């Protein structure tokens, strides 16, 4: 009697392989609406998957809101935006309790921080007290209102923006608060051909909108990707390399303030994201190099005499990265 040959079921993907697939699909889909800014997209996604927050510096009109909306759409997360102004109060950020006359009890009115992705637009326009309210939420991932703590829904990420040109009426973030951001991403004008494509698609209505991005996974899926990123392996030699880079910022002539230990920890966290983006579950020195500039630039201050002479901080950090010995693979 003839028998039908038994077919083997398709092999199941490992959690790590699924994480790589989800991450790369999100990169491709968001990249279709956030054109010409591949490095910015990769850096923001790296911070998100490392569970950190990002400070974005750039001129208005370069698509920062578009980027955050697109990422939220890709995993089905919630998105809120706060426009920081000099009269913004801490309760406008975190929320407050109010007395319900009909129910004869106090009710919690949640602020915009109760979301997955929060865009804090022009954070340096709000006074220090309001800035501190947001930075406390970023650090603790919870809100305390009238003595009661309320945990934020995971995942939670803040993308704070500041305009590098307009300084009138602003309250610059002090170094201790800047250090709470995992990365500082600088967004610049797109290349000519990318800008032409953006303008053409907008005027003709042929471009893909952030709201039209197909969802890649759900919130639970993105949390699983974050766990996979956190579990990437790091050799002791690579950790030592990250520490050498950070220590070099403290010892280089012309730098007034070097990065602290949190800088080295952040380097390794972000490097794990870049490793997974390359399909690896282990970190190599090049991942540390890729992470170094956005992770360190807001943790380091150039000496005033060099700043006056027009020296560029990014150039100094690039020189430190080039001159610091990296371990061999």
Image: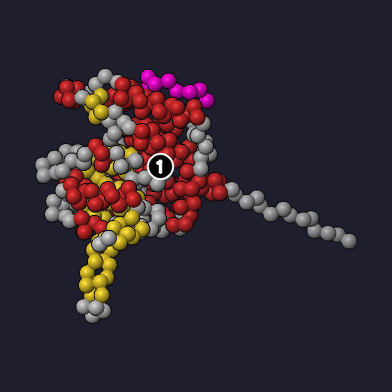
Other-residue count near label 1 (Cα within 10 Å), few / some / many at <14 / 14–19 / ≥20: many
- The image shows residue 219 at horizontal and vertical percentages of 44, 57
- The image shows residue 261 at horizontal and vertical percentages of 36, 33
Q: How is the image coloured?
A: secondary structure
The answer to which image quadrant residue 91 occupies is bottom left
Residue projecting furthest to the right? 1
The answer to which image quadrant residue 185 occupies is top left
Picture layout, residue 164 above or below residue 245 = below
Secondary structure character of the magenta stretch overall: loop
- The image shows residue 160 at horizontal and vertical percentages of 27, 47
Residue pictured at 83% horizontal, 59% vertical: 3
**Picture mark count:** 1
Callout 1: SS:
helix
Residue pictured at 26% horizontal, 51% vertical: 134
Residue 47 visible within the image: yes
Residue 218 counted in the magenta span: no
Region rendered in magenta: 322-329
- From the image, tell me which residue sits under label 1: 46
Q: Nearer the viewer, residue 321 or 266?
A: 266
Residue pictured at 52% horizontal, 37% vertical: 233
Instruction: Please state if 126 lies on the left or on the right of 34 as rendered.
Output: left
Instruction: Please state if 149 lies on the left or on the right of 307 as rendered.
Output: right
Work out which quarter of the rendered image holds the N terminus and state it.
bottom right
Residue pictured at 38% horizontal, 37% vertical: 266
């Amino acid at each position: 009697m003839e028998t039908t040959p038994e077919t083997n079921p398709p092999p199941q993907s490992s959690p790590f392989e699924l994480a790589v697939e989800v991450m790369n699909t999100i990169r491709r889909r968001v990249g279709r609406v956030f054109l010409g800014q591949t490095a910015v997209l990769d850096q923001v996604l790296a911070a998100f998957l490392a569970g950190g927050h990002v400070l974005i510096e750039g001129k208005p009109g370069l698509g920062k809101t578009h980027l955050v909306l697109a990422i939220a759409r890709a995993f089905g997360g919630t998105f809120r935006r706060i426009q920081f102004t000099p009269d913004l109060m801490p309760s406008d950020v975190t929320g407050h309790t109010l007395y319900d006359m009909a129910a004869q009890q106090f009710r919690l009115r949640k602020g915009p921080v109760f979301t997955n992705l929060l865009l804090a637009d022009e954070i340096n326009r709000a006074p220090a007290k309001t800035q501190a309210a947001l930075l406390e939420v970023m650090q603790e991932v919870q809100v305390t209102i009238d003595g009661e703590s309320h945990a934020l829904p995971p995942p939670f990420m803040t993308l704070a923006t500041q305009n590098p040109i307009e300084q009138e009426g602003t309250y610059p973030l002090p170094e201790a608060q800047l250090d709470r951001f995992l990365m500082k991403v600088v967004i610049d004008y797109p290349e000519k051909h990318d800008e032409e494509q953006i303008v053409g698609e907008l005027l003709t209505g042929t471009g893909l909108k952030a709201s039209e991005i197909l969802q890649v996974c759900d919130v639970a899926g993105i949390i699983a990707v974050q766990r996979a990123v956190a579990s990437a392996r790091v050799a002791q030699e690579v950790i030592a390399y990250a520490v050498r880079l950070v220590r070099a910022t403290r010892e280089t002539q012309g730098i007034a303030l070097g990065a602290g230990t949190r800088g080295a920890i952040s380097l390794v966290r972000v490097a794990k994201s870049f490793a997974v983006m390359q399909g690896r579950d282990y970190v190599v020195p090049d991942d540390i190099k890729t992470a170094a500039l956005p992770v360190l630039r807001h943790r380091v201050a150039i000496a005033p005499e060099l700043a006056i002479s027009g020296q560029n901080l990014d150039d100094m950090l690039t020189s430190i990265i080039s001159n610091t010995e990296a371990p061999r693979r």
